[in-house]
Amino acid sequence: MAIELKRVDEFAVVTFNRPDALNALSFSLIRDLGAKLDEVAASDARGLLLIGAGEKAFCAGADIKELRDRPLLDQKRGAELGQQTFAKLDRLPMPSVAVINGYAFGGGLEVALACTFRIAARTAKMGLPEIKLGLIPGYGGTQRLPRVVGPARALEMILTGKTIAAEEAERIGLVSRLIDGDALQAGIAFAREFSGYSLPVLSLAREAILRGLDTTLDDGLRIEADLSTLSFQTKDAEEGMAAFAEKRKPKFEDR
Ligand code: DAK
């Protein structure tokens, strides 16, 4: 299968598994990814890690060989398929981490941008090179990249199609941190920094940030007031505050 889903301890792990094509995203692979994300959403995993098979690539983008000579309407449907599939990552009940273990170009970087977090091997290289093919990004890159790195850097990356090294990606906030050693193990160690907290409360925090990015400061603050009030209604908030008062470690139960 071009997409593998496995469980490692408390985490779901999705592997892009077409190493001979640097894990390029064929349309069938994107459909398969969508089905696997539905499985993850219905599971009790406390986080999702995405990684590429092989030594070289996280994912080298859309399968260029498949994109040629298609009717325009199919291209539009293709963009919508990619966008809708990657949008599932935003709606997962658990945070997701793109473990960028090599090249992440085009659609490969776009899938990483749809994850909650991105971390990268020091040797990783990233970019949105669509312009070099006479195209522009179609799987969310023009919208998510400026939200992550700001419009000036997004314009530069998308209009020049340049490749950036992992260190620059960290400097501009495209990835949160650089990792050493086994990439999956490093991803799991990173995910353990949030996976002990309440999943519904983690979701409220993600929702407040993502919805706030799409609106004015005033509306965003209203969203925050509503969602932070909602967090008080969880059993986990009761538990967290009781544990503080009793000087013990909280035991969150996702309620
Ligand atoms: N698609 C298909 N095959 C790919 C591929 C890709 N994106 N990337 C690599 N491969 C294949 C190569 O063709 C080669 O296969 P063989 O020739 O051996 O059969 C094999 O993987 C190994 O690649 P290389 O020999 O090129 O490996 P190198 O280490 O020399 O170079 C590289 C690595 C990542 C620098 C190079 O492979 C490369 O430049 N790859 C292409 C990167 C890229 O341009 N990605 C696509 C960006 S565009 C849409 C709108 C927009 C889009 C999609 C849909 N709609 C409106 C529907 C845009 C999508 C994009 O992602």
Image (cartoon, rainbow, N blue to C red):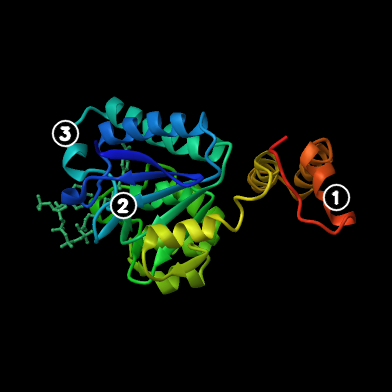
Q: Amino acid at mark 2?
A: Gly
Residue drawn at x 48%, y 56% as measured from the top left? 188
- Residue plotted at (84% across, 40% down): 232
**Label 2 close to label 3 by CB (< 8 Å):** no
User: Which is more foreground, mark 1 or mark 2?
Assistant: 1
Marks 1 and 2 close (CB-CB < 8 Å): no
In terms of secondary structure, where does tag 1 sit? Answer: helix
The amino acid on which the numbered mark 3 sits, given as a three-letter code, is: Asp
- What residue sits right under mark 1 in the picture? 241
Query: Residue 69 has which mark?
Result: 3
Q: CA distance from mark 3 to mark 1?
A: 60 Å
Q: Residues within 10 Å of mark 1 (few under 14, many from 20)?
A: few
Residue 216, percent from left and from top: 73, 47
In space, the residues marked 2 and 3 are separated at their CA atoms by 28 Å
Q: Which quarter of the rendering shows the C terminus?
A: top right
Task: Tell me: 238 left or right of 10.
Answer: right
Instruction: Determine which residue is flagged by label 2.
Output: 52
